[in-house]
Image (cartoon, coloured by chain):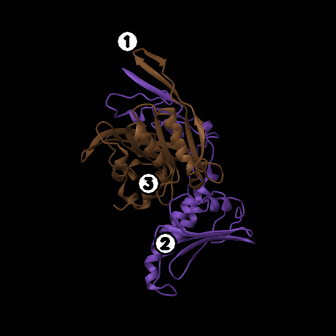
Chain colours: A purple, B brown
Amino acid sequence: MIGTLVAGLPYVLPMIFISSPGTSFAVRNPDSHEVAAPWLFEQLSEGTSDKTEPQAAHVQPEDGLSESFTSKTVVSAASSRQVGSQIAPWADQAIVSLRAQSPKHDGDLLDEAVETQTAALEDAVELISHLAIELPDVSRPMISIDEDGYVCLFWVDEDAMASMTSYGDATYSFFATDGVREIRSNEEPLGAPLPPKLMHLLASGIFEKRTLAA
Amino acid sequence: MTWRPLHSRNAIERVRLTVQFTEPVPAKISRQMAASIQKTQSETRMQGPTPVSTTSFNVMVDPSGAPQVAPQAALPPGWKFERFASNNVPVEACVFDGATFIYESSDYHRWSAMVQRVRKVAQDALQRASDALTFGLISLEYIDRFIFEGRATDAAIPGIFPGLENVLSSEAIEGRQLWHLHRGWYETSGEAILLVNQNMDAQDGQVLGREEPARSLQLTTRADLRSPHNSLEMAGWDSNLDLLHQTTDLHFKKVLSPHLHASVGISS
């Protein structure tokens, strides 16, 4: 039987966990980029997996059936550490708050805006999920819902402000200024990484570590 | 006490798309692939290329069962591109080792967005390679995680994966011991033949503010399309990806207890 062992490729991103607000779940955050084969999926703790098999080894059996997962690595508890700071800690709580906003037909909200608001709220949840990963250090945004049903996330800090508005159509707009320059876009696709200029401004630290009431 | 998904919207820890070539990609084409990703990096925020080296061996097992390892011709140097969060943690990567291309992301929110993202980041690179070489495998893999909110040794399996009572020990079923279950099978969809692997791994880890370990379950669902049984040309790229997605989605939904479906955004 001839097989092929390949070591050194591909890639496993660092594990990122988030738990309920204020907590985070374990366990592994390699200081350098983790490199592993696609069939190699890491163990976060001493588990029950096939410890005797070689690390990053790929032996292709005749039927290919078990090829994907024939190899394992086991990370000892000693190599684990907390990674709670990798996702914005306010995200889950903000999502719970958003989901508690049920559209109402009375008050200032127009009837036709109810449907928009329902979709815009879910889009805002997706936007927050994305921000929590891309900008783990940014503070919790304030959230407002306008009479058209659009949902706006915004940060204000002296001369700086930033806002991102979801419309319920899988797009959002943004405006941001640091007091010197302004950036804006009327339509960005939801689910895509933040545009470089917005990412740069939000990651610049202007809105960090100031928890604003939602 | 119940199981809950990793995130508020889904349980997806990572998603990984793998494209394997039937033979090593010549260095010139590898460079062209990297250049095509580099061309859009100011927009995609993919930083690189960073060199990646690969060590490769042949393993032969003789009739007595003794393994013999011999060096194989080295693959051409590979490369990787990464997108980083504001704290410099990579959240997305493209890695190529000279024979296998991998796109991986922990920033997954919806399938349609991922398809668009792969198209923007990597499709041109793959198109260049496929003009000269053939794909041997296209694979999609979702790595999901659920966390038990109570004591780890109370993490009973029926609360998340019902129907495993006859394939695991009672101690594992009740959560008193760690366990794993790895399985795979072939299945057909129209004219396509898919290889599906689905692995469940119980793992213990720490939750901030809690001394005792918390139990989590990692569920990996992977679907492969392989040549020569399937047509893997770029012309069928979108439909192949959709088929892989539908297959992994179906088997994720099948294995997960219906009462958790809503928590991960799927309708029962």
In the current view of this chain or complex, which residue is farthest to the left?
A: B190
Let me know if marks 2 and 3 both belong to one chain. Answer: no
Question: From mark 1 to mark 3, how far is it between C-alphas?
Answer: 48 Å
Choose between B144 and B156: the one closer to the eye: B144
Residue B163 spot, x, y in % from top left? 32, 47
Element under label 3?
helix
Residues at marks 2 and 1, CA–CA distance in whole angstroms:
66 Å
Q: Position of residue B179 (x, y in %)?
A: 43, 39
Instruction: Give neighbour class at mark 1: few <14, some 14-19, many 20+ (Cα, 10 Å).
Output: few
Outermost residue, top direction?
B64
Provide the residue designation for mark 1: B64
Q: Nearer the viewer, mark 1 or mark 3?
A: 3
Contact (Cβ within 8 Å) of mark 1 with mark 3: no
Residue B206 appears in the picture as rendered = no
Q: Amino acid at mark 2?
A: Ala
**Residue B124, how many percent across, how many down?**
47, 48
Residue, disc 3: B115
Mark 2 belongs to chain: A
* Marker disc for residue A120: 2
Q: Tell me the element at label 2.
A: helix
Label 3 sits on what residue type?
Val
| Mark 2 vs mark 1: in front | 2
Mark 1 element type: loop
Q: Amino acid at mark 1?
A: Ser
